[in-house]
Amino acid sequence: MKAKTYIGRSMPRLEDPPLVRGRGRFAGDISFPLQLHMRLVRSPLAHGRIVNIDAAAGRAMPGVVAVWTSADIADVPPIDFREGRIERLEPYRQPVLATERVRYVGEPVAAVFAADPYIAEDAADVAAIEIEELPVLLDADAQPAEFSPGRSTEAAIVRQGYGDVDAAMARAHKVIDLDLKIGRHSGVPIETRGAIGRYDAARDILELHGAAKVPHRIRELLALMLRRPLSSIHVHEADVGGGFGVRGELYPEDVLVCVAAMRLGRPVKWIEDRREHFISANHSRQQRHRVRAGVDADGVILAFDDEFWHDQGAYVRTHATRVATMISGILPGPYRIPAYRSVGHFRLTNKTPAATYRAPGRYETTFVRERLIEAIAHALKLDSIEVRRRNAITAAEMPFHRALEVLGEEVVHDTGDYIGLLDKVLKQALWPKLTADLARRRQNGELVGAGVAMYVEKSGLGPSDCVKIAVDTSGRVEVVTGGASMGQGFETVVAQVAAEMIGVDYRDVRVIHGQTDRIAFGLGAHASRATVMTASATRVAALKLRDKALDMAAQLMQSAPEDLDIIEGMVVRRSRGASIPLGAIAAALLPASPARQGREPGLCADGWFHTAHQVYPYGSHLAVVKVDPDTGAVAIERYIIGYDVGRAINPMLVNGQIVGGFVQGLGGALLEEFRYSERGDPLSVTFADYLLPTAREIPPVEIILTEDFPADLNPLGIKGAGESGITAVGAAIANAVEDAIGVPGAITELPITPLRLKEILRGRQ
């Protein structure tokens, strides 16, 4: 009998059976006896001074238990930052309920608690808010205003760079500059946010249910804000109907249900409606970049200079300046840039606060960088593919160090062949034939074109992760991790690694995650870290458990451990002799078992994985588009994604991640945009105004998944894939649209809406 392999195989997802049978447990499914329901009174104005809040009518309604304003929770501080205290940004944090001012439409002003959700809604509707309207600031690149006495709306300036940019620009053959914009959009998952607070007075335990993404970090923030011992707070992850960076942070509503559960003595439930989600959940992306490149006569980049304005919205939320810092650290991408300078203006406006959204900073920078590559090619009358070849970092130069920082670490491109992967994408597209066919079609009057974009991702954020593995007397394996699932197949991947390392069927592995009372440490699921870190920690723990099982089995089977193997949950002699079920080994290691003979009780092990550095996977996208000259609509005729994942634990899941990411990137490239009126009123609060891609707009995606360059920073060689499908979509489609309409430099803004494209086409005519 030969041991089965699971790593590298497209195994069916373990998560799916309860979900497809309607037995998932989402936040909306979680209820407790005697629970109250919370609804929020939100600001109708983008900026104003609170004069009075009259909630008397709501308090008098039957079934209403309480109505709170900021005065009722004056001891609860503003929401802090996920990575710890940042003193210079503390004045810009969001209060749980608005205090003296409101700063965006939708900001929580009061909270209503009632026995019925409809009563709570009615009570919130009758609250009378008197607000003295103040001037609004809606453009991050406008002159900063006063945030509070002595403080500007420019909360920070982010600077990174190396080399003498000015000297390189001075000796350049040509300097190319662009002014580019990325619109405001967000993840908009199918499931809106939800939170259920419950206080167990007998045990003095506060529970938060419905959390996602970073349960342990949420617990730490709650402990800090509510001045409670960390051990007295339990955070429980539910099933998640999409996360994408938007869900899972600590929002005002999460704090409110916890405080109310303790003070009112009853569980408190809050489920967000869709309009609330549009105006309250984190926005992202919106930036303006003024970027320059100095190049020699052959198109080799000598210097790269970027000044950008990041629209943070009304407050600095839990991510602090992470997105802006990421922008400045990863903008050079896959190219060899000798001199580089980035200056980012991190500014507040009277809009919904912003934070991360799938591939934060990378979606934006790839659009900026790849538009600049196209501009260089046009200015020098060169082929843009050739410009990429001349500037890309080569495989021989790896590891390639940059004097830049991403998420607190120096940027080091670890392994890869960027041009080699681009060549595979071009080969798949039959590039010479494709370009000739498109040229012929343009001659016949069609507006068709192709565009490519290269990018570098980052994944596997450390520094550490741990896993606990145990086998019970039935032979079933339980893996407890501080990771989290956002629908990406996390349980399946962890089970595959554990199963192969131990020698059991992956269906016999149960993965527990997102439960802070089961494991003391965890970094959740963000920054494409889950597979790299948690799978690596799982491998460590599984191998330790395997060694312990073989040691115990050797005594029971009167054999040497090296003569034994574990196959399909059975410990067997390699000489095909006797065998013992793994469950029997677990029984022999029970605390009361005399066979244990001084060994530590339990067939269990802990595994830690530590890394000093992230890994940098990479990819190339190719888009073929057709533009309708009458409507300005863009149709995607073909889309190819090449991605080197290092090593795929489950290729089917990686492909799914890539396709899902592409769809979101398509939305950001052509459709999705949060817009505001001159008064700061949000105009995109329904799916009639905030457009998402449908099956009609989504082409089949051709995926070239390569494993040519495994990571050398973890034993499995894996790199993350969660953000690979979205990163270059805006850039590739923009390049293709510009090729189709034949107006170099025309595409300067995402999304490329029909209205904007029609204006460009009118200018072309």
Image (cartoon, rainbow, N blue to C red):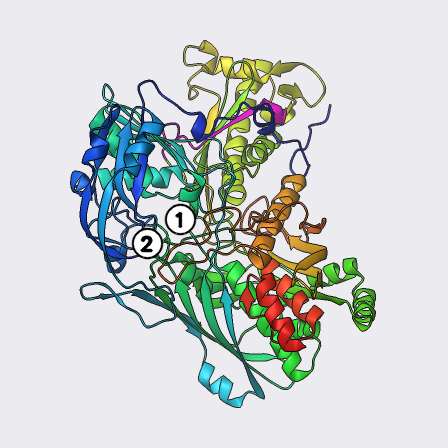
| Residue type for callout 2 | Tyr
Query: CB atoms at circles 2 and 1 under 8 Å apart?
Result: yes
Against 621, is 125 above or below?
Answer: above
In the image, is residue 519 part of the stretch drawn in magenta?
yes
Range drawn in magenta = 503-520
Expressed as whole percent of the image width and height from the top left, the position of residue 582 reads 58, 18
- How far apart are labels 2 and 1 at the CA level? 9 Å
Quarter of image, res 637: bottom right
Quarter of image, res 234: top left
- Of mark 2 and mark 1, the one earlier in the sequence is 2
Expressed as whole percent of the image width and height from the top left, the position of residue 363 reads 53, 59
| Residue type for callout 1 | Ile
| Residue holding disc 2 | 104
Q: Element at badge 1? A: helix
| Residue holding disc 1 | 279
Q: Is residue 679 visible?
A: yes
In the image, is residue 616 part of the stretch drawn in magenta?
no
**Viewer-nearest residue: 591 or 421:** 421
